[in-house]
Image: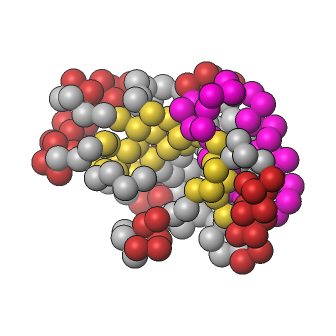
Amino acid sequence: MGASAFFIRLAGCDVGCPWCDTKISWNAKRHPQVAIADLVDQALESKPAIVVITGGEPLMHDLTELTQQLKKQGLRVHLETSGAHPFSGNFDWVTFSPKQFKLPHHSVYEQVSELKVVIKEPLDLEWAELNAKMLDAHILKYLQAEWSTVSSKNLVMDYVLDHQDWRVSIQTHKLLGVR
């Protein structure tokens, strides 16, 4: 949070989060393909602290070549994923945001740097704890209130107050009006 980032948002998603704020990314056919070399050039031109590969669901794609080319240029590469597909690529940081309606692939758990679970209702807290138990104890754990559900903020705040191993995640770009 707070670092300059170049986002590579890959099209295609079969997870279908009801609260998704980028549903436009779901249908890959609506978006032109861009050559890896062009993506690397665009990333280099922006001089970011990090490059974030996200989606849609980025692991629907084999990310090996893309991450190799980015890292070859000295860029730090992060991934944001639901983990619903087999893991691919070489990353400096992996944000894992598992969803109950499309279960994570087992290959993702050993790659995770941080766990971020969107909370809409109390059952989501159980889902968060279930996934946390499958990760190393040192992994950072975040709860993020589902932005359009007013009661979710209180669920997250109360839970974090009672569970010191969890942190609150805020969608800073929404607060700042950054797109």
Q: Is residue 46 left or right of residue 57?
A: left
Let me know if residue 16 appears in the view.
no
Q: Residue at x 26, y 44 (%)?
A: 49
x and y percentages locating residue 105 in the rendered image? 67, 30
Residue 118 belongs to magenta span: yes
Q: In the picture shown, does residue 31 fall above or below 34?
A: below
Residue 5 belongs to magenta span: no
Q: In the picture shown, does residue 98 fall above or below 160?
A: above
Q: Residue at x 30, y 24 (%)?
A: 68
Q: In the picture shown, does residue 174 fall above or below 41?
A: below
Q: Residue at x 57, y 30 (%)?
A: 112
Q: Residue at x 35, y 35 (%)?
A: 77
In the rendered image, the quadrant that contains the C terminus is: bottom left
Task: Please give the count of numbered marks on the rendered protein.
Answer: 0
Q: Nearer the viewer, residue 82 or 160?
A: 160
Q: Nearer the viewer, residue 152 or 20?
A: 152
| Applied colour scheme | secondary structure
Q: Is residue 117 left or right of residue 50?
A: right
Q: In the picture shown, does residue 69 fall above or below 27?
A: above
x and y percentages locating residue 154 in the rendered image? 75, 70
x and y percentages locating residue 79 in the rendered image? 45, 39
Where are the magenta residues, as a range? 112-140
